[in-house]
Amino acid sequence: MNERTEASPQGERLQKVLAQAGIGSRREMEEWIGAGRVSVNGTVATLGMRVSEGDKVLVDGRHIRLQLQAEQPLPRILLYHKQEGEIVSRDDPKERANVFDALPKLRGQKWIAIGRLDFNTSGLLIFTTSGELANRLMHPRFEVEREYAVRVQGEMTQDQMHQMIKEGIELEDGLVRFEHLSDEGGEGFNHWYRLVLKEGRNRVVRRTFEALGLPVSRLMRVRFGIINLPPRVKRGMMAELGEREVRAILEWVGLPAGVARQVVDDGRKSKLQRARPRKN
């Protein structure tokens, strides 16, 4: 049988298929294609190219098994309760504790972190094998809510609380406004607040409170979109979502996954496990 030498004029767009295969987000795949890192049937790929079953796709010389829509399996989704003192990056010159080291090993795919948390922030961190899902949850145009519990040194005035809901505050990289803000009380010099944002700029919560003269002493993400941090997933533990929960998330972001009725709320049917000990 002769090997195909041309990409199919039908089929699905190459960047979409690569994202579905868990290589990276669709935007990353477009950049890789533009940089000449992808080939189809021995020819350097171009943006807009379509592929079908039987096409030979290589990324940096590595063969990628095509997962077209008709055969596309459900992506995997992990919830991880990040601890303070861990970094959300595979490459760290300081060789600090890395959240990726604790994740289950994959073959032919990679775990994609949905939204980062900085070194001193704890709470909900989501990983998936679907670049398309990661893009739907992270891209600013989708305005997915992020909810945080924050403890600050001091207390907001009523005028400051009103300002953060109605007008926002201008930082060096643009306006920040909270979708929701509630006073959760506190003792002594420390005070707790619960807030909701529809963006994920770098250190945006910490920078906002610092601009108000209120240094953050603790910060924890408790919700991302419809996904809450399950109470039983303690620090350093992870839970893999079941099929019904995954389908509910895919439906919520508008990706095809069949009929789903359950919104993810507490991970009762998730597989729970403790992350492996950190490397020294």
Image: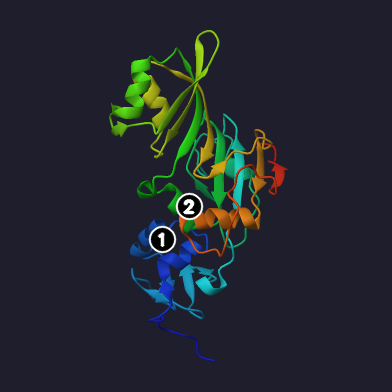
User: In terms of depth relative to the viewer, which is nearer, 226 or 239?
Assistant: 226
User: Label 1, on which residue?
Assistant: 29
Residue at the front extreme? 261
Q: Amino acid under label 1?
A: Met
225 left or right of 240? Answer: left
Q: Residue 274: x, y in percent?
A: 71, 40
At 53% from the left edge and 38% from the top edge, which residue is drawn?
Answer: 223
Task: Tell me the residue at 39%/45% (across/down).
Answer: 143
Q: Where residue 175 sits: x, y (%)?
A: 29, 32
Mark with earlier residue (2, 1): 1
For mark 1, does the 10 Å Cα neighbourhood hold few (<14), some (14 to 19), or many (20 or more) residues?
many
265 over 121 or under it: above or below? below
Residue at point 34%, 31% (across, down): 177
Image mark count: 2
Residue 11 location, x and y as percent? 43, 77
Is residue 88 visible to the viewer in this orientation of the structure?
Answer: no
Residue 166 versus residue 101 in the image, above or below? above
Residue 134: numbered disc: 2
Q: Could you tell me if the residues under marks 2 and 1 are in contact, i.e. CB atoms within 8 Å? A: no
Q: Is residue 11 above or below residue 211?
A: below
Tell me the SS state at disc 1. helix
What residue is rendered at 68% in x and 48% in y?
270
The Cα–Cα distance between marks 2 and 1, rounded to whole angstroms, is: 13 Å
Q: Is residue 44 above or below residue 95?
A: below
Position of 41 compared to 105: left or right?
left
